[in-house]
Amino acid sequence: MPAPDGEAAPASAATATAATAAETRQQRPRLSPEELAARGEAPVKPEFLRTTAARVHVGAVAGCRLVSSSNGGSSGGGAAGSGAPPSVAAAGPGENQREVRQKSKKQIKKERSQQRFSTSELCTWFALGKCPYGADCRFNHDVEAYLASKAEELPGSCPFSAAAHCPFGITCRWASKHARPDALTQQYVHDKQSAAAAASAQDAAAQGQARQGQEQSDMAPAGGVTGNVEMAGTEAAGPALTTAGAAPAAPAAAQQEQQPAGQQEQPAEQEAGQQWWRRDGTIPAAVLELPVVAEPPAEAINVLSKDLQSKLRKGQYDFGAADAVLASMGIRNHRGGGRGQQERGGRGGRGGRGGRGRGRGQEQQPEQAAAAEEGGKQPAEAESLEEPSAKRPKVEGGQEGALPGAAAGGDDAAYLDGLGAPADAAGAAPAAPAAPAEPVEPSGVVGRDQPREKRTIDFRGKTFLAPLTTVGNLPFRRLCKSLGADITCGEMALGTNLLQGQPSEWALLKRHKDEDCFGVQLCGGYADTMARCAQLVEDACQVDFVDLNFGCPIDVVCSKGAGSACLLRPQRMEQIVRSMSSVLSCPLTFKMRKGYHDGSDIAHTLVPQAASWGASAITLHGRTREQRYSRLADWPYIKRCVEAAEPSGIQMVGNGDVFSWEDHYRHLEECPGLATTYIARGALIKPWIFTEIKERRHWDISAGERLDFFKRFCSFGLEHWGSDSRGVETTRRFLLEWLSFTHRYIPVGLLEVLPQRMHWRPPAFVGRSDLETLLASDNAADWVAISEMLLGPAPQGFVFSPKHKANSYARREGADLAAVAGPAVPAGGAPAGSPAGARQAGGEEEEY
């Protein structure tokens, strides 16, 4: 019976359109690799090309949710009714991964309240035997109910096996394998396993005795003499004693006999799965074991202490050094006057009374922080970043009360005109660091000295991993450090959130012991806030340098007067840099773009004066804020700025589209005064770029080696975020965010022209193995399948949508449909070249 026209018509129209697009591509003449590269298309070898309609999305993990949904619950591979081989799954069911709606605050609050009384989680303090509330605790203390709903344990060993004990106790996903279990784990897991093993041994012994007795009775004659009967009885007792003596080995054999045939071969399959990549690059059939370090995991540095958090929230922290510097510069301190804004903002937010306040590295993203500020969740945050003009009167050298979004004019225009004059005429001399009225007590790091001598740092000839929002977390930095990164920097942290003691924001400052040259990046729009934040970092953190972000293009950050909006107020930039440099003993650097609006480049007028402000280095991104990440970076302008800054002696770092070792060394040769390059998206897509730079070669890395990097990242993530279910899922989330970038990598062996460029649009292609094809998939459901290889099955109802719309080009499917419809209408429906079309191509929330 044919389907109704209303149902069949859309499907047939889409199929016909896709078929027409495929025919159109096949009829086009094949362009040369150089012509394809000139058009911004990746020149992939023809034997690896596939049409978009025939592109294969692989997902063949045992128990994979993607394969199960497409097979009606089966654990094999292949789409339902498609007759596909077990290692192939259709891309259709995975598309719902992108359709994720943001939950409202009311819905999130309701889910948190329901989760509080759920048995799916156990009270953290109770699991460690330290809950002070006992029966009055609002969280679950029912261990039996928790174990009944706990996710299955993962293969391998606990990430904290080398430590004295696992800090997550019975909630660990490897609790049954703890060599030194805690009391709850011993009582509810190990003792029950021992009891079950003993019972199984007794059953096996009884079965052995019964079997042996049956065999002896079958062998005895029906009318034997008494002596023979006695001998038979003696022989029957012998095997019974032997079986009882071999009791420890009997349970395993008995369990193996009782298991189905498929389960008996599971250890062999797991062992084969661990070595799959050494053979042909096929996809493993079971969850892989993660590597475990031989030494105890090191504690993170720069952790927010409870005492410091309490002082910040109560407004009792002594900011005497920062306030003295602000007073000497003639800048009014709007955050002073007793408890002030810190009292109003002390409660609430992700780190306040309403949140869990988890202090083991739960990362907070700047977009979320800025959204909370914009929504009014934190009155102090919104007021400190964007205060009304009535509260921001004029101060020396600028209009603090001006709106951040206004064009630079008035005093700022005159300020820019005067930058060409000598330093003493263009602005005041740098303020000398003012000593605090009374000693500042150390408050964050145990045993930290309070140095006052200004330190220096040299970026020349070193590889620099840029601060990366969301993905540049501590586990990812550890991986890049092992691959050759010399300098690392934490994610951008908002100064107001740090001053309020938010644990989620302080988690962005954490440092691993392997990061021998480490800095933190701060963002803010006012000198009083940033000076106090600088003193806080000086007192409570161990860093080698502090970086200021004057280049963030995010709307919610710029609308508060921070990030790239500071380029519209160069006098404010000078005040922030001078005040922070006077407070800090470590070097102060800042990142900026070449301008705010297209055609209004101002960086070349600022960089010659930055050294007199107190900055040690400048990172210049060769794009404007309006440009964001579209079009190529302007490296000739970076060279112009490097030459302008050369007389001052300040170090210059170039940023933009560095994606290979050739790009790195070419920029250093073209700009002799350049210290090094800033590697951002290049490290996200292929973190082994640091190895390529140091070895000056293109690494044709195999799919197995790439998966090995994901395994190491997961191992580092479990150490950082925890080995319980929450830590596993946090690691999964950040792994998926990283996978949303790595799929853009095209293997070296597939390209006709080297090296790959950042702006190249990759066509639909298949790799040299199933795994390489899977790693190149742009389907979010395939990324979830990869995470299931490493971290086990995802929870029921798990969905994922990338936070950053990273591609600066439209998806290939949309481009093909646009080619059929005509050149005037692109994939999204907006006119080509228009701002709306650019936002659709790059994504309104595009970050990298």
Image: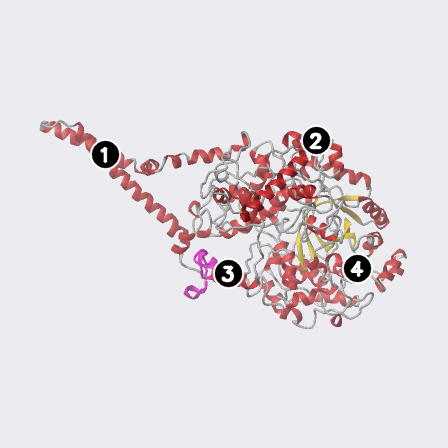
| Cα separation between marks 3 and 4 | 42 Å
| Image x and y of residue 601, in percent | 82, 53
Q: Quadrant of residue 528?
A: bottom right
Can see residue 28? yes
In the displayed structure image, the side of residue 278 where residue 175 appears, left or right: left
| Cα separation between marks 3 and 2 | 52 Å
| Cα separation between marks 2 and 1 | 70 Å
Q: Quickly name the residue at label 1.
A: 211
Can see residue 523? no
Numbered tag placed on residue 111 in the rendering: 3
Q: Quickly name the residue at label 2.
A: 752
Q: Do the residues labelled 1 and 3 touch (CB within 8 Å)?
A: no
Could you say which is closer to the camera, residue 208 or residue 452?
A: 208
Q: Which of marks 3 and 4 is in front?
A: 3
Residue type marked 3: Glu
Q: Circle 4 — which element?
A: helix
Pointer 3 or 2: first along the chain: 3
Pointer 2 or 1: first along the chain: 1
Residue type marked 1: Arg
Q: Which of marks 4 and 2 is in front?
A: 2
Q: Circle 2 — which element?
A: loop
Pointer 4 or 1: first along the chain: 1
